[in-house]
Amino acid sequence: MAGPGGHFGPRGFLTEEEKQNMPQVTGTLIRRIMGYLKPYWVQFVLVFVTILLSSVVGLLPSIITGRIVDEALIGRNMKLLIELLLMALGTLAVSQVVNVLSGYISAWISRRIIFDMKNQMYDHLQHMPHAFFTSEKQGDIITRMNSDISGVSSVISGTLTSIVSNVATVVTTLVALFSMSWQLACVGILVIPLLIIPTRSVGRTRWKLLTESQAKNDEMNQLINETLSVSGSLLVKLFTREKREYERFVAVNEEVTQLALKEERSGRWFRVVMGMFTQIGPLLIYFAGGWFIIKNMDTALTVGTVTATVALINRLYRPVESLLNIQVDFTRSLALFSRIFDYFDREIAISTPEKTLTPDFIDAEIRFEHVRFGYETEKVILKDIDFVVPAGKMYAIVGPSGSGKSTITNLIPRLYDVWDGRVFIDGVDVRDMDLTCLRSQIGMVTQDTYL
């Protein structure tokens, strides 16, 4: 069995934060997401066709196994045995090739969508006002640009194709099962709840342990960062807190270790229990099939049919369990797109107007007329600023730190827009100019040594 996040793992549960921030499913949101998929609809159709083909071809080895038992082994036909074995090998090869093709196409689609979204996001962010970059955390911007958009790949090639694949597998397998023996099919299906119920119960316990473990790991990482950084280690030494910080670390490390051991024990017993449950279905089918054959209750039932049914019923367990987690996967996928769209929906507050004016930059005066401005609504930095810098003259703005010197400079190329008043260049309001033209005529040397 897979570990955390894998099959029968705890991935089928939402965290408390995910439950609280669950995005609202609306037609607008779905249409917006589909807008990114629309350019590649032909490729999507091809993926769905290959998935359906793979599901049908995947049934053949199990069905052929039934013929091997009934016609080749019981019939003692060596030639037919070889033919059926080669046929089964061929269907397996075809199924694998189709799976590879489907995976490649879905991966290609997801990479192209990521390419489109990253281009769109980068272009959008480039046109965001300077205030956006001073208010947003740089780490958040990078996360939206890289991790969130890259996560779309798992939505396209993982969640979406997985849902289609699992539905196709379940439907085709059920059709094959009931066409061979509806009695054995019912027996096999009755076992599925016995497999799913303990899976979700134990999975919920492991999910809780993993969540607690992650929180403690974050606490330990924070402690390491605080005490072993340059500034942190200096403070520890100056205040002689080495022993106390060591004791704090040992305590947190002990909690992390104990939680990890609990999760490991839970996982091991879980795998033992699930290993037993996965064998109950085949055993019941063998029992029911043997009962029908021995008691002559179903003269059409053969040993090969029983064998094929056992092989097919095992195909149901994984996709059924995965389909039970559709809500979780769907919610997380929508949350991912919601985070991305949150940035796309941020207004580009400073932009070029439809009708622009072009001043004479060569011989132009700069004039501030009753300018009022602040970075925060409740805190005014500039109030009723009114002055003129004549053409050809050099002026210096002098004042204490935080008095607004840089702010005045930033208003000229419209890194920010004034709240009230106006800034003129050669008698033209800077808000009436083409942004590219305005900024290309202004040279600035900032305090930062970024270049």
Image (spheres, rainbow, N blue to C red):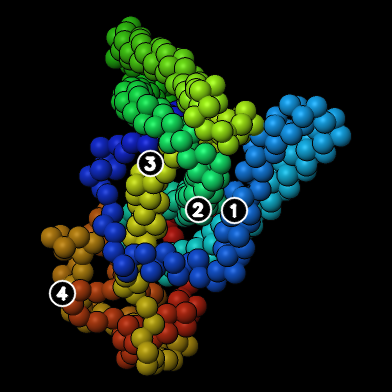
Q: What residue do we see at 67% from left, 43% from top?
A: 60
Quick one: SS at disc 4?
A: strand
| Placement of 260 over or under 28, stated as above or below | above
Q: What number is the disc on residue 384?
A: 4
Comes first in the chain, label 2 or label 3: 2
Q: Determine which residue is flagged by label 3.
A: 324
- Judging depth in this view, the residue of 54 and 28 nearest the camera is 54
Q: Determine which residue is flagged by label 1.
A: 51
Disc 1 and disc 3 in contact, CB within 8 angstroms:
no
Residue 194 shows in this picture = yes
Comes first in the chain, label 2 or label 1: 1
Disc 2 and disc 1 in contact, CB within 8 angstroms:
yes
Disc 4 and disc 3 in contact, CB within 8 angstroms:
no
Quick one: SS at disc 3?
A: loop
Give the x, y percent position of residue 14.
31, 39
Residue 391 is drawn in which quadrant?
Answer: bottom left
Q: Determine which residue is flagged by label 2.
A: 164
Give the x, y percent position of residue 432.
34, 87
Total labels: the figure holds 4
Numbered disc in front, either 4 or 2: 2
Comes first in the chain, label 1 or label 3: 1
Distance between the Cα atoms at labels 4 and 1?
68 Å
Q: Residues within 10 Å of mark 2 (few under 14, many from 20)?
A: some
- Looking at the rendered image, the quarter that the C terminus falls into is bottom right
- Judging depth in this view, the residue of 297 and 416 nearest the camera is 297
Give the x, y percent position of residue 299.
56, 33
Which amino acid does the dot numbered 1 rest on?
Ile
Q: Residue furthest right?
A: 79
